[in-house]
Image (cartoon, grey):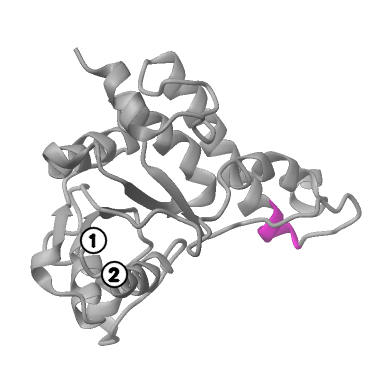
Amino acid sequence: MLLFGVTSLSEVVVAPLVSRFPPVELANAEPPYGLIVLGAGLNEVYAAEMGVPMEFEDGGEAVPIVALLARRYPQARIIVSGGGSAYPLAPLRAADGMRRLLIDFGVTADRIEVDADSQTTAQRALNTLRLVGDDRDQTWWVITPAHRMPRLIGAYRRHGFDPVAYPIDFKWMPPFSPTYLYGVPDGLALTDAGAKEWFGLVLYYLTGRTDALFPGPSPRPAREMAAAHSP
């Protein structure tokens, strides 16, 4: 275990996850009809208690990124998903915080739809799809930390929905450095994040909640995939 905390073995665990879906090139990308952001790292309880505008955790950059994308694509719908546990209650859930901050950043409230009830990746995929509604054949971008993207995309494809992956919160960047040494807490945290996702990928595949063991970029347009899963 110490080897994973100190050496670059932690990179071996997380690098394939982080690099599975490339970043979106805005200059060449088809404009999104809508943006879906899942699991932004916000702690509304701490922010409220300490009297500060925001408190970010892992993945917290999702909110300013979505705010910038909302300005770039002013017609895009926005769906935020986060929270779902018994604590905290509204209005201190992560999804409540995403909505609040997006409005503070200038996004109009009528563009934002909220899923604050989902507790798992599979539930978030299903519940955000319900909010997408009849617009599922349009171009949607889904925004979530890069190491979680394969499982999320697989969960969406299981329901015939193939959004554009917009990964954020990159926990590793190339090139792989076999001689790099980590501080033990950092190396173990990286290993833990990767190991949890690999376990989740295997579990979701075996229980039929993803369409592939290790989902990657789709060779087919979203409309073609939706048609293939339609009755």
Q: Name which residue lies at 42% across and 52% down.
A: 144
Asked whether 221 or 170 is in front, the reply is 221
Q: What residue did someone put label 2 on?
A: 70
Specify whether residue 185 is painted magenta.
yes
Q: In which quarter of the image is the C terminus?
A: top left
Label 2 crowd (10 A; few <14 / some 14-19 / many >=20):
many
Indicate whether 66 appears above or below 79.
below
Indicate whether 57 appears above or below 157.
below
Q: Name which residue lies at 24% across and 73% down.
A: 102
Q: Where is residue 157 in the image (x, y as percent from the top left)?
A: 36, 28
Q: Which amino acid does label 1 sit on?
A: Ala
Label 2 to label 1, Cα distance in Å?
A: 7 Å
Q: Position of residue 227 (x, y in %)?
A: 28, 21
Indicate whether 222 appears above or below 10.
above
Q: Main SS of the magenta segment? A: helix
Q: What secondary structure is marked by label 2?
A: helix
Mark 2 and mark 1 residues within 8 Å of each other at the beta carbon: yes
Q: Give the range drawn in magenta.
A: 183-187
Q: What secondary structure is marked by label 1?
A: loop
Which of the marked residues, 2 or 1, is nearer the chain's N terminus?
A: 2
